[in-house]
Image: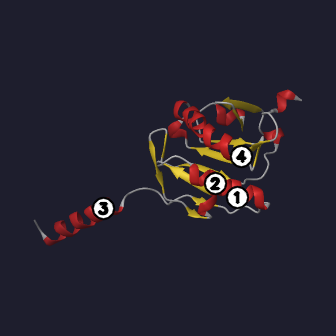
Amino acid sequence: MSLRTRGAVACAVLLLATGCSSTPPEIDGPDLPAAQDAACRALVAALPDTLVGEKAVEVTGATAYGAAWGDPAIVLTCGVVAVDISDVPQCVEADGIGWLVSDEDAEGDRDATFTADGYRPRVRLEVPEDYLPEQGASALAELAAPLKQHLKKTVSCLSVSDF
């Protein structure tokens, strides 16, 4: 084996050893009242190590407010701002938690963003197209127990069709 070939093999092995995954998701830090801040931190600490069979992955930024699983990453962020309901006409329920989602996202042929808008603090789950529709629905259901335990329900899931 030539020196050049050995160098290429060594580089390939190094890439495999360090992983070929994408950049870790970044979590934005929310500006929350003290009680909601504590609820977010408790929720994130209670999240499962696996979600729809995907292991938790590293996140950057305000790590106390979010988590991620898999590659591409399914990303949960706690403490997000309210959704403009005029842009999100559907409400889907999974194990008693109402999630707002746009019609286009609900079709499952592109990345989808789900927001538990009826809870405080609000939670957003970004699900890459690779997991939709089946694993996306399962992810929502798997997250129901920790959300119910740590967040306060303020309103039932509403969508544009409810007005």
Mark 2 sits on what residue?
42
Taking the spot 52% from the left edge, 46% from the top edge, the residue there is: 48
Check if mark 3's residue and mark 1's residue have beta carbons within 8 Å.
Answer: no
Sequence-wise, the earlier of marks 2 and 3 is 3
Q: Percent x, y for residue 53?
A: 44, 39
Sequence-wise, the earlier of marks 4 and 1 is 1
Q: Amino acid at mark 3?
A: Ala
- SS for callout 2: helix
Check if mark 2's residue and mark 3's residue have beta carbons within 8 Å.
Answer: no
Task: Answer left or right for 35 relative to 51.
Answer: right
Taking the spot 89% from the left edge, 29% from the top edge, the residue there is: 163
Q: Amino acid at mark 1?
A: Ala
Mark 1 sits on what residue?
38
Sequence-wise, the earlier of marks 4 and 2 is 2
Give the CA separation, mark 3 to mark 1. Answer: 37 Å
- SS for callout 1: helix
Task: Answer left or right for 156 relative to 20.
Answer: right
Q: Amino acid at mark 2?
A: Ala
- SS for callout 4: loop
Mark 4 sits on what residue?
151
Q: Amino acid at mark 4?
A: Leu
Q: Quadrant of the N terminus?
A: bottom left
